[in-house]
Image: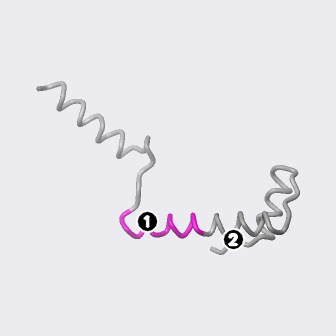
Amino acid sequence: MRINPESVKALAREVFEYELTDDAAASVARILGAMTNGLRQLEVAGGSQPPFGYPTLEAEARRLRQRASQ
């Protein structure tokens, strides 16, 4: 997926009723492109869990049960 400045400008206009300059939209598009590329690399490397995702909560519960039983 490629994010372009025109899409960024349209989103800013539609969601926030804000007009971005061409330079600002290009900067935002570059930043978002870099972020999505980084996220894709994380997924390829095995993914990451949000801090309150189910596997994370389950691991924390297991750790707390083990500590309580000691």
Residue 16 marker: none
Image vertical order of residue 51 relative to residue 13, above or below: above
Q: x, y percentage for residue 48? A: 41, 56
Q: Main secondary structure of the magenta part?
A: helix
Residue located at (84% from left, 68% from top): 22
- In this image, 58 relative to 50: left or right? left
Element under disc 2: loop
Q: Quadrant of residue 64?
A: top left
Which residue is under mark 2? 3
In the image, taking residue 41 as reference, residue 9 lies left or right, namely right
The range drawn in magenta is 34-46
Tell me the residue that label 1 is attached to.
43
- Whether residues under marks 1 and 2 lie with C-beta atoms below 8 angstroms apart, the answer is no
Q: Amino acid at mark 1?
A: Glu
| Mark 1 vs 2, N-terminal side | 2
Q: Badge 1: how crowded within 10 Å, few (<14), some, or many (20+)?
A: few
Which quadrant would the C terminus be assigned to in this image?
A: top left
Callout 1: helix, strand or loop? Answer: helix
